[in-house]
Image (cartoon, rainbow, N blue to C red):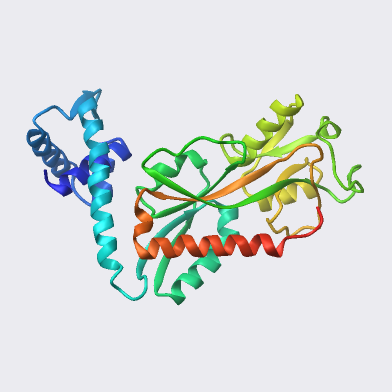
Amino acid sequence: MNIERLRLLRALAERGTVHAAADAMSLTPSAVSQQLKILQREAGVPLLEPAGRRVRLTDAGRMLVARADDVLAALDRAQAEMDAYRSTPRGTVRVAMFPSGAAMLLAGLITRAAAIGVEVLGRDIDQPAASAPGQLADFDVVVVHRDERDTTAWGPRIESTLLLREPLEVLLPPRHRLAARKRVGLRELAGESWIGVQGGLMVDDVLRSLATLSGVEPRIVQRVNDFRVVEELVAAGVGIALLPRYVLTARHLIRKPVSGIRIGRRIEAVTRTGAKARPAVKAVVGILEALARETVERNVGPH
């Protein structure tokens, strides 16, 4: 079977439509359809079936995509072995990060990677961690954050490198009734208004975990994804919020650990299985690990 046709089939599986696969592979939809028909003849079994105005993979098609991943991963490893003959990693690595992770890590990643001959093309994308496998259609490394209680497995096609665990704290305005406390309990916050985030994002997952563990349902009055905007709303007395410990604030606000319960986010670098065999990708993940360690070390102190 032709390797490029297998790539087209995988692109269709990842992106859902012929048009989207064509855009990703810089081809016309008719060219993609023609190549997939040829692949189907080579396979000898139906790989696609109609689904309304679109097509979808048959069971045989899904099986072939899984095998195509193995074949393409083997080719990536072979290419990586050729790359390994070079004295240093080189090339371009595309990296996606959630916004507060980009603020924490991206500048250091770009400059340190450039120093060893690797160009990092970074993007900040505010999407749930579960979207990472889909993002790997466009990026080599996706940095995600999720509730540390989320133990959902990534699956055999994905590798994850833990970068750090970061505690979440309650963000209060300076004259809040609990501002003088060393720690605050969840039940003490039962009557508060909360600034939340879009459903499915990390902070929302943590708030739902807290509600389950404590039996106290937070009253969310606003949902804002940008932590800088959250700061302004807390400063104005609109509500309180959860904020990761290492996120810098521009406003003078009060941050308090939550007593009696452990809450935090886990930050991970996600890649395709086998992608770290490419020296440039391996180097980028290694730099991210170093930056994460340094972030924790800078913030060690009494909490």
Q: At 14% across and 41% down in the image, what residue appears?
A: 30
190 shown above or below 245: above
Q: Nearer the viewer, residue 261 or 31?
A: 261
289 displayed left or right of 70 = right
Q: Quick check: can you spot residue 58?
A: no
226 shown above or below 105: above
**Quarter of the rendering containing residue 16:** top left
Question: How far across and down, in percent of the image, does residue 174 sit?
Answer: 87, 51
Q: Nearer the viewer, residue 238 or 85?
A: 85
Q: Nearer the viewer, residue 37 or 222?
A: 37
Q: Nearer the viewer, residue 224 or 136?
A: 136
Q: At 28% across and 71% down in the image, what residue appears?
A: 85
Q: Quick check: can you spot residue 40?
A: yes
Q: Quadrant of the N terminus?
A: top left
Q: At 53% across and 47% down in the image, what residue appears?
A: 126
Question: How far across and down, in percent of the image, does residue 113 sit?
Answer: 46, 70
274 shown above or below 185: below
11 displayed left or right of 139 = left
Question: How far across and down, in percent of the image, does residue 299 sit?
Answer: 72, 61
**Quarter of the rendering containing residue 183:** top right
Q: At 91% across and 42% down in the image, what residue appears?
A: 177
